[in-house]
Every structure is written in C-alpha cells, then in structure tokens.
C-alpha cells in the first residue's frame, strides 16, 4: 500500500534572495517525474517552511538556498520541523554551497545536498531511492 | 547559384554532426549566410555609421579608438570597511569606476539587526543600514573623482539618498556627482525578485528619482534598465532584449506622464545586458538593442535630441554560465563572453571571476577577471576597429532576426496593456520559466553541452581557494546599527520618518525628503517600513 503512495514534496525558497530559477526547474522536473509538488514561493522563513511542510503533509522538503545563508537556514528549518514533531520529513537541498559546508549540514540532519550542475534525473533518482512516505502517525487528533 | 540552390545541390546535409544547430537560446541557425540574407538592407538607413542613427554599429563615432569601455568590477562583501578596502585595491589596479554590491537585507529593505537578516548580513554584498555605514564605505574616495554604480532596486531611493548625503558631507555638489543606480523595479518582478511594494508605487518611486536627478544631479543615471537578471533567470537572448526594452518603454511612459520632457531625461537612461556563451547571438543582441531603442525613442516617443536615441549599456558576463566543476574553465568562458561584449560595443563591462559559483570572489580571482578585460583591450587589437563584424552576412542577419522577434514580444506586451499589466498576469515570468526548463531538459538530454558538467567530466577535483565571510561581520554590523539607533536624536528621527510617510501619501517627490531623513540617521529598514505601511507588500504569485 505504502509503495503505491505518490510522494509529496515541498520545494522551498528560504532566505531573502530571489534566485528561483533552480527551485522552479526542480519543482517542474519532480512534477514531470510523477511526484506531487508544492512550491512555497520566495522569501520564506524557516518557520513558514516547516509550517507549510506539516500543513501540506509532505514526505520531503527540498530547500533551495543561493544567498550564502545556508549554515543558518538549513539547521533552522530542521529545528522548526522538530518542534512540530515532523522530523521524519526528509530534508534535502541545493544551491551555491561550498564542499566544506556539506558534511556540517549533513550532521545537522540534511540528507543530501545537490550542487550546481547536477542533472534533474539524478535528483529524481535520489528521491526515489531515499524518500519514503511518512509513517501514518496519529496526526488526526 | 542562389543560396537555396547551393543548399539543395551542394551542401552535404547528411554529413552534419548534429541533428539541429541552434544557439544557446535554441534559435536555429543556418549553415551559411550570404548576401541574400541581407537583401533589401540599406547601409545608411538600416545599419548606419557609428554615432549615426540607428546606431547599429555603435553609439559614438570613435568608439574604443577614442575611449575604451569602463572596466567596472562589481564588489561588495562584509562590513563597509571590508568593501572600502576592495574598492581601493581595484582603483589601484587600474579600474576606473566603482560598482557596489549590497547584501540581501539591504536589497530587501531590512536593517542588519532585523530577524529576517539573520545569517545574510554581509554575505552576498556589503552591509549598509545607516548613513554611518555609507560614509565608511566611501571613506577616502572623493565622489567627484570616481563614478559609482550601485546595484540596488527596491531600496534604491534610500541608498541614493545616502550616497548624495555622503557627497554633501564631502563638500561635493550634486551636479558633480556621477554614477548609476540600478533602480529597475520592473525586472525585479520579472526576474530578480527582490521587492517591497507592488509595481505601481514602485514605478512611482523610480519616476521620482528620474525627476529629481534630471533637475538636481544631471550626471547621475537614475535607472539602469536591466536585462542581465532576466537572462540569468533563464530567458532566451530575444526575451532578454524584448523584456528589457519593454521595461524601458514603461519608465519613459511614466516619466512623460509625470510631465517631464522626454529629451530632458532620456539621455540619462542607461542599460545593462548579459553576455552569455553564444558568441554571435550576443553580438547580434547588442547591435539589435541599439537600433531598436533608437527607433523606439525617435518614432514612438518623438524624442528630438539625438542623445535621447542612444542605448548606452553596461554589460556583465553570465554568472549562470559558470560552473563549479573545473572552475578554471570559467576564465575561458568569461574571456569569450567579454569579447562578445566588446565586439557588441558596450560602454562598460564587468567580467565575472572564476570562483563565483562557489562564493564571492577572492582578490586573485578578481584580478584575473580584470586582466581579461585589459588583455582584450590592449593586446588583442579588437578595440582598434569599430564594429569589425558589421557587414558580416551572418551577424547582420542575426541582428535583423533578434530585432524582429523582440519587436514581436514588445507588440504582445503592448496588446496586454504594457509591462506592468503583463507582469501582473505573469506573462514574462512564465515565458522565462518555460525557456529555463526547456534549456535544462536539453542539458539533461545532452543536446546542449556544458564542458565539465555533462561532457568531459572528471571524477575528483582539487578544491580552489574561496572567500569566507567571517561570522563576526554580522555580529559587528548588528551592534553598530543598534548603537546608532540608541544614540541618534530620536525626536528628529520621528519627525523625518513622518515626513517620508506624508510624501509617500501626498505624491510629492520623495528624494529631498529621503536625503533629509537619512541625514538624521533614519535607517534603511525604518524607511522601508514606511513604504510597506503606505504601499503594501508585494506577494510573489509563485506559479510554476
């Protein structure tokens, strides 16, 4: 049954920058690959993103950050998800992120970082392999 | 033999190495261009001499034989003192104009101590919240001796007020202050997406600035109509050309409606284009842009002063074309792009640094980028002949085609009721997103090549040195703005912000009021809050 469920993915633009080319391309590519995709739009705070993830009951959040604030914003999104009891949502991301920062981000709970030049097929394949539908937790209450 | 006959009888189509040949913008190109492709063209009427209408060959008669283009490297990071040092380094290395990058909080109208600025202070540009920061930024740089470009849009009015206030403190009269402020809000809604209020009030503020500069600061360019960001967002070259000129039409229209005489302000409008990888497409784009703007100004707006017809432009090599993989290859890309800019006749040029897909550039990377321009200017010889590609059947045919396709877009935007209306219904945004996605699909399918990314890939790479911004910067800037907020004359601040509020509502020109307000140390964020309060906040439609 859970194998049949179509994965729901939130593509989120954190921070103040307006570079949404990548986010929009990924959102379209994931939709074309058969996922259900929700795109937050620009300039979202970590709280807004976590709230949208819970409201939309997504299985994963893909964060796009090109402003250099990734070391602040990724951990803040993970923290905000945790506070909502939603830390089983897979968080991945992409943007202008130096190699040195990637291990540190993974330690905070980011599952994968895609840097410029990665093909959309690679991201689709990674999601198919690593994102599982969220367990049916008692969220009806 | 005609071209058609040659193609049909002699050209070995079956030997072609690709299924189709197209530019990076996916415009198909013919195997060969001949005099037939420029049939019906009259040299003086359609191409013209440099400095003569319609300016296809260049805006000035002597072009680079008279004066080379301005080499203007965009710089800004960390504290105002950090950027001030980089400015002085660039001036010492032979650069002749300054170009300021501000951080994201400045670009969105937040002070360094605002919660939304967390993690962003000094990261993508220099942090400026008050006049005190602006004074530090230009400390020891006489504002009557350099020209400065400032890349800022929704808060441009505030930053320009600060810059003029610094000039005043240095004893430099406004009529001697020269430079450019980007201040192109329409392309923000289309592409770069940093905004405060909706398009209508945003264009009103732009118009205030055009009006003020026309009267008080005639050496200042109050708006730099920018295609750069449109292209970076994934548009084609034709879309970049069309949407930029359509934005320009909207500003000219607004200023005329304000009661200004077109010939009083049009000579101070300037442009900013992208230089991407496809060499001939870019050259054709710049040549077409000049000819189109001349026609628009003379025929559509009835401008009489020949200087009103000139499209003078800054250009920057394409940031989005650079790769994190094998970053040294970027030096070559930048050189090719910069060469296209020079052959396209630009007035000012920024060459990107090889490390910009990883972080802000290091000093060494910036040096190579600047040297690239100097090599083109002083070693290659290309600057010695004006428009050396003029008369090339291929380049003239591509120029004609860019013009035709871009005018078709402009007509469509006119039919929609102009650019503001087109933006409200998402027309240019959607066209760009479609083009960006199409290009990505071509890349993923290997139909378009990026060396080192989808072809000639190497498994492991040596990381290169990158610039790190010290997290201390944010703490120091937050502390500094809080100190200013504590120590200034609060009653005066309240009064001045009240004046800004009133001017926003009653429609009087905002600039004198803003200059007064920043001198009283009203902050960028406080003034932006007045805009939010009076004009409302724009929301991104967020369609895919």
Image (tube, rainbow, N blue to C red):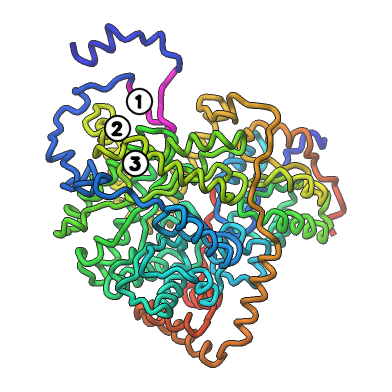
Earlier residue among tags 3 and 1: 1
- Looking at the rendered structure, whether the residues under marks 1 and 2 are on a common chain is answered as yes
Task: Identify the residue at image location x=71%, y=31%.
Answer: A125
Given residues B322 and A84, the one toward you in this image is B322
Rendered location of residue B247, percent (x, y)? 35, 55
**Is residue A2 found left or right of B387 in the rendered image?**
right
Sequence-first disc among 1 and 2: 1
Q: Furthest-right residue in view?
A: A138
Q: Label 2 crowding class (10 Å Cα cut-off): few <14, some 14-19, many 20+?
A: many
User: Can the viewer see residue B253 in this picture?
Assistant: yes
Q: Where is residue B353 in the image (x, y as percent from the top left)?
A: 53, 45
Foreground disc of the pair 3, 1: 3
Callout 3: chain: B
* Magenta segment includes B51: no
Marks 1 and 2 in Cβ contact (< 8 Å):
yes
User: Callout 3: 10 Å neighbours few (<14), some, many (20+)?
Assistant: many
Label 3's element? helix
Q: Which residue is denoted by mark 1 in the rendering?
A: B29
Residue at left 38%, top 43%? B239
Q: In which quarter of the image is residue B65?
A: top left
Residue B342 is tagged as: 3
The boundaries of the magenta stretch are: B19-30
Element class at badge 1: loop
Residue named by callout 2:
B398
Separation of residues labelled 3 and 2 (CA atoms): 17 Å
**Hey, which quadrant is residue B468 in on the image?**
bottom right
Instruction: Tell me if residue B27 is in the magenta stretch.
Output: yes
Apparent side of residue B210 relative to residue A137 in the rendered image (left or right): left
Residue at far front of view: B92
């Amino acid at each position: 049954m859970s194998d049949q469920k179509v994965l729901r993915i939130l593509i989120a633009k954190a921070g103040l920058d307006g570079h949404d080319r990548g986010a929009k391309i990924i959102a379209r590519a994931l939709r074309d690959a058969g996922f259900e995709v929700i795109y937050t739009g620009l300039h979202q705070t970590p709280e807004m993103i976590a709230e949208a993830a819970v409201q939309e009951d997504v299985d994963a959040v893909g964060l796009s950050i090109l402003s250099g604030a990734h070391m602040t914003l990724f951990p803040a999104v993970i923290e905000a998800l945790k506070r909502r009891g939603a830390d089983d949502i897979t968080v991945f991301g992409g943007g202008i992120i130096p190699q040195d920062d990637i291990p540190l981000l993974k330690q905070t709970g980011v599952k994968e970082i895609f840097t410029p030049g990665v093909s959309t097929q690679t991201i689709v394949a990674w999601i198919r392999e690593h994102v599982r539908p969220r367990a049916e937790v008692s969220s009806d209450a | 033999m005609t071209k058609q006959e040659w193609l049909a009888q002699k050209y070995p189509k079956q030997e072609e190495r690709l299924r189709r040949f197209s530019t990076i913008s996916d415009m198909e190109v013919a195997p060969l261009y001949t005099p037939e492709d420029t049939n019906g063209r009259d040299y003086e009427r359609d191409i013209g001499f440099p400095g003569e209408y319609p300016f296809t060959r260049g805006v000035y008669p002597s072009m680079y034989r008279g004066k080379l283009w301005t080499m203007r490297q965009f710089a800004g990071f960390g504290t105002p003192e950090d950027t001030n040092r980089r400015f002085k380094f660039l001036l010492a290395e032979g650069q002749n104009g300054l170009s300021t990058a501000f951080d994201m909080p400045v670009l969105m109208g937040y002070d360094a101590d605002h919660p939304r600025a967390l993690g962003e202070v000094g990261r993508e540009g220099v942090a400026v919240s008050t006049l005190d920061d602006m004074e530090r930024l230009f400390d020891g740089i006489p504002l009557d001796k350099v020209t400065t470009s400032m890349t800022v849009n929704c808060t441009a009015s505030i930053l320009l007020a600060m810059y003029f206030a610094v000039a005043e403190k240095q004893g430099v009269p406004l009529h001697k202050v020269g430079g450019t402020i980007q201040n192109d809000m329409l392309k923000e809604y289309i592409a770069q997406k940093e905004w405060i209020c909706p398009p209508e009030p945003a264009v009103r503020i732009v118009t205030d600035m055009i009006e003020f500069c026309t009267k008080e600061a005639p050496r200042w360019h109050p708006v730099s109509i920018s295609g750069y960001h449109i292209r970076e967002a994934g548009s084609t070259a034709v879309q970049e050309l069309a949407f930029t000129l359509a934005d320009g039409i909207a500003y000219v229209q607004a200023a005329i409606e304000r009661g200004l005489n077109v010939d009083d302000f049009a000579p101070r409008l300037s442009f900013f284009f992208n230089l991407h990888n496809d060499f001939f497409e870019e050259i054709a784009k710049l040549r077409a842009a000049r000819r189109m703007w001349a026609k628009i100004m003379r025929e559509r707006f009835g401008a009489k002063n020949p200087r009103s017809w000139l499209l003078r432009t800054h250009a920057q090599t394409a940031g989005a074309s650079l790769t994190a993989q094998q970053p040294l290859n970027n030096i070559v890309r930048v050189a090719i792009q910069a060469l296209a800019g020079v052959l396209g006749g630009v007035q000012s040029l920024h060459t990107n640094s090889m490390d910009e897909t990883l972080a802000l550039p290091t000093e060494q990377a910036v040096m190579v980028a600047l040297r690239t321009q100097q090599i083109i200017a002083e070693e290659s010889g290309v600057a010695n002949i004006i428009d050396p590609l003029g008369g090339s059947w291929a380049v003239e045919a591509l120029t004609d085609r860019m013009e035709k396709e871009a005018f078709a877009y402009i007509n469509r935007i006119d039919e929609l009721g102009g650019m503001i209306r087109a933006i409200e219904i998402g027309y240019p945004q959607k066209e760009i997103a479609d083009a960006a996605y199409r290009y990505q699909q071509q890349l993923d399918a290997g139909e378009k090549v990026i060396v080192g990314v989808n072809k000639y890939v190497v498994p492991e790479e040596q990381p290169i040195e990158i610039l790190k911004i010290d997290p201390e910067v944010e703490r120091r800037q937050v502390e500094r703005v809080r100190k200013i907020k504590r120590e200034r004359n609060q009653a005066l601040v309240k009064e001045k912000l009240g004046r800004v509020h009133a001017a926003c509502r009653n429609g009087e020109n905002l600039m004198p009021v803003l200059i007064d307000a920043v001198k009283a140390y009203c902050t960028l964020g406080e003034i932006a809050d007045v805009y939010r309060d009076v004009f409302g906040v724009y929301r991104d439609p967020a369609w895919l």
